[in-house]
Amino acid sequence: MEVTPTDLGPKEEAEGLMSETKPPTMEVIPVGAANRDVYNNLAQGYEAEFLATTGKEPDAQGVFELDTKMGNDVRGFVLSVAGVPAGLIAVRLKDGGSFEVAEFYVVPSFRKQAWGQKFAHAVWRAMPGKWEIKQIAGAEYAAEFWRKTIGAFPPMEFQEDRYDDSYWGMVTRQRFVIATPPST
């Protein structure tokens, strides 16, 4: 609805009909040289959040070592909401061309607003194929987020199991396939 001041009387102006707001925009930005610091800063929040679960500690400068580093087989993306860095995802390209969500984080003030789900869905649409996501023991809230997020991507069936990961030990794992969209 587009409203101009001439369409409104004094009552409507007083009720705030002129201040109709547009929903914030979301952007998924590939990590490169220009925004690697943004990704790394967000990753520090992610590492700190899992401190009690992983037992990791920051170094003498207060910086956590990252488990997943950008490189040949890992691509990173930053979630931006209304121009504000709001999250990250690291995607590992595995043997056979499948993908693994290696890291995923949404800044707490952007949670419970579906930004994380929209972010994951946007990445999956851009990278169809076989996917795997793992959650470490003690992160049941993360497993629930992924079940809900995968289930909301229609049509989607997924398998979930407990898996002995060589790095993390026993994890909850979801596996699924994102179909390649038909050509238009």
Image: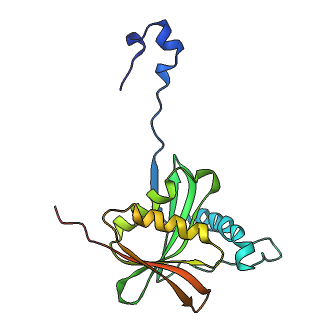
Figure check: 15 above or below 83:
above
Residue at image location 46% in from the left, 40% down from the top: 23
- Nearest to the observer: residue 77 or residue 103: 103
- Residue 22 in the image, given as x and y percentages of width and height: 45, 35
Residue at image location 75% in from the left, 79% down from the top: 55
- Nearest to the observer: residue 106 or residue 77: 106
- Residue 54 in the image, given as x and y percentages of width and height: 70, 79
* Colour convention: rainbow
Residue 2 relative to residue 167: left or right: left
Residue at image location 45% in from the left, 63% down from the top: 149
Residue at image location 44% in from the left, 7% down from the top: 9
Residue 18 relative to residue 59: left or right: left
Is any atom of residue 101 visible in this view?
yes
- Residue 91 in the image, given as x and y percentages of width and height: 47, 75
Figure check: 1 above or below 143:
above
- Residue 80 in the image, given as x and y percentages of width and height: 52, 54
Q: Residue furthest bottom?
A: 166
Figure check: 144 above or below 169:
above
Q: Residue furthest left?
A: 184
Quadrant position of the C terminus in the picture: bottom left
Residue 23 relative to residue 86: left or right: left
Q: Residue furthest right?
A: 60
Figure check: 8 above or below 131:
above
Is any atom of residue 33 visible in this view?
no
**Rendering quarter of residue 68:** bottom right
Q: How many marks?
A: 0
Quadrant position of the N terminus in the picture: top left
**Rendering quarter of residue 56:** bottom right
